[in-house]
Amino acid sequence: MDEASGQNIDGEAPVAETVVETEGATVTENAELERTLGLSGGLAIGIGTMIGAGIFVFPGLAAGRAGPAAAASFAIGAVIALLVALPASELATAMPKSGGGYYFISRGLGALAGAVVGLSLWFGLVFATAFYLVGFGFYAVDALGLAGVAAGEGLVIPIALLVGAGFTVLNVTGTENAAKLQNGVVALLLAILGVFLTFGVLDAVGVVGRPTAPERFAPFGPFPVLSTAALVFTSYLGFAQVATVAGEMKAPGRNLPLAMVGSVLVVGVLYVATIFVATSAIGSEALGRLGETAMVEVGGELLGPAGALAIVFGGLLATMSSANASVLSTSRAIYAVSKDALLPRRASRINLRYGTPHVALGLAGGPILALTATGQVEILAEVASFLHLVMYGLMCVALIALRRDEPEWYDPDFRVPGYPAVPVVGAVASFALIGFMQRLSQVVGLAIMAATAGWYFYYAGDVKLKGAL
């Protein structure tokens, strides 16, 4: 695969990595990754990455925009994620390397598209992390309130900034520490959601609790349903993370697409069920009025003070989990583009004491704290969705380009059923959802993409990354 050549203005060339695949392992120059992950392991990664802040922060904001039809907004987001999951699975089994969407696009469509996506992904994750941290701040203030400590919303941003700085330091001191924290948080979160949704669904269908009057499903019409889908798509960011472990998965041609599709389906059902339970419990108008922490009121309505406490605890865990995972992913996104000479090589420098990319983590942590200070929850979430939707749409386009000129090295273990309809619809749906976002989010997203393209032409215009087609 003739995939990388040229130099940036510092004279650095892309670092080519030879990969040899066997039935039991994926062997690179630096490591031998044994194929130890089965379907359940892949599902755990996908679900663990997506279950997070969205399920606790979005219900109030979404119901305020779309009413009970916010459930349809989450369903639309799940369908778009599914349409991208299948092409991502094919690309991952053809190119089992770290870097995920950035790697597929740079090798399928070339260095310019790769640079725009790789650098935009850095900023997309920065916006997402800032959104999670502000959500954490709101839940922390509610937690202090339940503990009898009077803390107004003025403390939301200072708390978010403190926790963001803490996560950056945690990730510098070792990925292992961060991964252990992540696994524990996801397990606790699923337990809380399981109890909450079981009781909530029984209440909503009238088996327990008092009956509630049904609401009009879409009181504001169809457009808010679609604009809300654009807002809440942030909830599905991360399903493509499963693709990054393709080299460690047993029977990847079978298990990888099943893990990606299965995790999106599970998480989509959980999101839709949560909105159904929340709107049934206190109504969409009250949810919208209560904003980022409306789920606390829902927990209290269904299960009393213990329910409110459980939701506050779950909200803290979820926002913490999402923020921590995103800090880690942001630094790895910077690391990937740096190895391809699209950023100075020093950005991928590894800390000798802890074995972590400390410069990349610094480049992630600084912008995260700056955006967190703005406190603009909806803009942060939408810009994150914008930049990820561009990447997902271009992944579908990259698949079409590779299939059209199918090079010799392109030999995926899994091929998308329904080709070319699935990637074409996936690309169109991803780009179309951007059209329903707020104007400010669109302008910020486009400005970031233009800036990344400008950086490529200034710094790395001679770098070529496209695979031989």
Image (tube, rainbow, N blue to C red):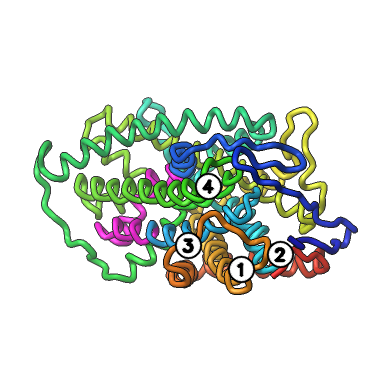
- Tell me the amino acid under the disc marked 1: Leu
- The front one of 376 and 435 is 435
Mark sitting on residue 402: 1
207 relative to 10 in the view: left or right: left
Identified by mark 2, the residue type is: Gly
Q: Is residue 348 above or below residue 410?
A: above
Say if the magenta span includes residue 76. Answer: yes
* Rendered location of residue 104, percent (x, y): 63, 59
Q: Do the residues labelled 4 and 2 touch (CB within 8 Å)?
A: no
**Residue tagged by mark 3?**
416
- Please say if the residues under marks 1 and 3 sit with CB atoms less than 8 Å apart: no
Q: In which quarter of the image is residue 109?
A: bottom right
Q: Is the magenta stretch mostly helix, strand or loop?
A: helix
Q: Report which residue position mark 2 lands on.
A: 467
Mark 4 or mark 2, which is nearer to you? 4
**The magenta segment:** 50-77
Between 69 and 51, the residue placed more toward the observer is: 51
Asked if labels 2 and 3 touch by Cβ distance under 8 angstroms, the answer is no
Disc 2 element: loop
User: Residue, x 62% and y 69% (percent of image)?
Assistant: 406
Per the image, the residue denoted by label 4 is 252
Q: Distance between the residues labelled 1 and 3?
A: 13 Å
Q: Does the magenta stretch include residue 275?
A: no
Percent across and percent down for residue 46 are 47, 44
Q: Residues within 10 Å of mark 2 (few under 14, many from 20)?
A: many
Q: Residue visible at 26% across and 29% down?
A: 305
Q: Which of marks 4 and 2 is nearer the N terminus?
A: 4
- Against 181, residue 387 (above or below) is below
| Contact between labelled residues 1 and 2, with CB atoms less than 8 Å apart | yes
Q: What element carries label 3?
A: loop
The residue under the point 85% across, 57% down is: 13
Q: Which x, y percent locates residue 402?
A: 61, 68
